[in-house]
Amino acid sequence: MHFTTIFIWFMLYSILGWIFETIYCSIKGLKWDNRGMLIGPYCPIYGVGAVADVLLCGNMDSAPAIFFSCMLGSAVMEYTTSYVTEHLFHAVWWDYSRLPFNLNGRICLGCSLGFGVAGLAVHYGIHPVIICITEPIPLDAQEAISLLLMFVFAADCALTADSLAAINVKLAATLTAIDSQIAEKYDNFIANTRQNLSEGLGTLKEKLTPESTGDASSKTGSKASILITMEEYRERRTHEEVKKTLSTMSWAQIRALRSTVSFRRSRYSEIGSKMKHALSFHKKKDDN
């Protein structure tokens, strides 16, 4: 079996995986959901899993053995992929935390059982069709096709990795800008408070009279209003910085941002969610 044939299988299964997951998630969410972290219409994890099923389970005649091999193999592969990508890019592409029998939100029993069934479907139903597609193609033509696919796939991987790295930089810069503006606002508030206290020091005795109870209540209300004002200011500045950051993002970076579920870092997760919400709002606005 030639490597070029295996790579073509990998790409075909990656495309089929993308089609399945996109249709499933779009129907589930009642809206178009372009799945996968890459720009192209393929999910490599499906390609790797299906090719591994074909190569490792090809000589197995027992359906239960194939089922449990695919179930366990998919769990290991899915957990490893999730762990590596999250630590490289601090992003989450799937999260099973809300599903029963999950492990750190990376894998869950239901999905692993589903991949076991998918392994049987590949072994007994899909792969014979794939062979009928690729077998008639001459080896020279397969090499040319695989080289073209490799170039496109490698370029996609490089562009996506660069976009995800840039997103992390932009998230950090956005948070720094927000914190800087909040700190400046707070410093101005402290300076104004000190000035007011200094100016009112001469009338301190008058404020300590019994009639000053009302003044104390007004001070408490004033303090609460200041806190509300600061919170409103933070929300306003966050909204403005999110809009500013999104305006500087390339199409590939926006595509990469949309493909994520969340970000592993808590602060990145909050600002990332606001960016995704802003993108969804603008998309709905454009559709209308």
Image (tube, helix red, strand yellow):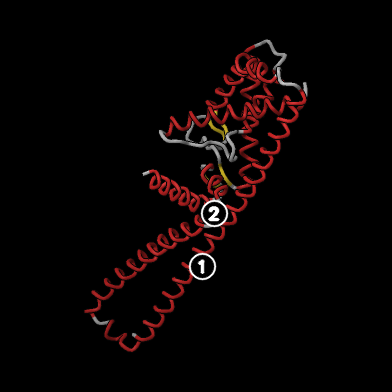
Between 11 and 175, the one nearer to me in the picture:
11
Establish if 255 lies above or below 234.
Answer: above
Mark 2 surroundings within 10 Å by alpha-carbon count, few (fewer than 14), some (14 through 19), many (20 or more): some
Query: Circle 1 sits on which residue?
Result: 180
Question: Left of 190 or right of it: where is 83?
Answer: right
- The amino acid marked with disc number 2 is Met
- The amino acid marked with disc number 1 is Ser
Residue located at (52% from left, 54% from top): 267
Rendering quarter of residue 160: top right
Please tell me which of labels 2 and 1 falls first in the chain.
1
* Circle 2: element type: loop
Residue located at (50% from left, 56% from top): 247
Report x, y in % for residue 35: 53, 36
Q: Residue furthest top?
A: 61
For the N terminus, the image quarter is top right
Query: Circle 2 sits on which residue?
Result: 249
Residue located at (73% from left, 26% from top): 142
Report x, y in % for residue 38: 60, 40
